[in-house]
Amino acid sequence: MYLESLFQSFADIYREYLKVCDSEGKPKMSRTVFVAEVKAGNISLFIPRQEKSDLCCEYSQDIVAEDVYHQHRERKEDFDKFEEGGIKSINPSKDANVTNICALRYSRDGSLAFKLSFEEEWQAMPMGRRVKLSKSEPPKLYNSRRKIKKSKFDHLQQLKAVLPAEVHHFYDSLPHL
């Protein structure tokens, strides 16, 4: 059951309930108990809109431009076709994008593979490595490299197992005690 649209929240309903209780001299429930009783009675504030989206309602009130509405309708019709089984892919006319990926796999050699569904085989990521930026040297704070403790050096050596081979030299060359 749905209440009239003059109520905007459960707080509004509770305030009205308190007024009625005061005028009739009846005992009052706490707000928590009141809201629980209302929900237990399967009473709701808002009637759900079945088929109309917010944009469709705004268009019917001349809030949204016609071209925006038509783009929205085209997307909706494409989605309806997809639900009916007329389209095999989520993105039929374009390549997959990051939101279509369901699994990623990183390899120690720095390669990246992905799956668009769990049943598919792994596919290599179709892009190359990032372009290395030109080196710009910040001003030196010390005359020589500072030495780190042996335990920290050992921990950093353990990290090399999950880092690309091209950065191993940096970790090997760290001065340590």
Image (cartoon, rainbow, N blue to C red):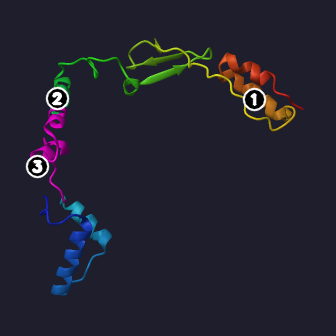
Above or below: residue 67 compared with residue 8: above
Task: Read off the residue under disc 1.
Answer: 156
Q: Position of residue 44 (x, y in %)?
A: 19, 58
Q: Position of residue 78 (x, y in %)?
A: 18, 25
Residue at x-position 24% and y-position 64%: 9
Q: Which class describes the residues within 10 Å of circle 1: few (<14), some (14-19), or many (20+)?
A: some
Residue at x-position 23% and y-position 61%: 40
Left or right of residue 2: residue 138: right
Q: Which of the 4 image quadrants contains residue 46?
A: bottom left
Q: Does the segment drawn in magenta span residue 19?
A: no
Task: Read off the residue under disc 3.
Answer: 61
* Residue extending farthest left: 60
User: For numbered disc 2, what is the local secondary structure?
Assistant: helix
Residue at x-position 16% and y-position 34%: 67
Left or right of residue 174: residue 115: left
Task: Read off the residue under disc 2.
Answer: 74
User: For numbered disc 3, what is the local secondary structure?
Assistant: loop
User: For numbered disc 1, what is the local secondary structure?
Assistant: helix
Q: Which of the 4 image quadrants contains residue 175?
A: top right
Q: CA distance from mark 1 to mark 3?
A: 63 Å
The three-letter code of the residue at mark 2 reads Glu
Q: Which class describes the residues within 10 Å of circle 2: few (<14), some (14-19), or many (20+)?
A: few
Comparing 100 with 22, the one in front is 100
Q: Position of residue 141 (x, y in %)?
A: 80, 38
Q: Which residues are magenta?
A: 45-72
Q: Position of residue 60 (x, y in %)?
A: 9, 45
Q: CA distance from mark 2 to mark 1?
A: 54 Å
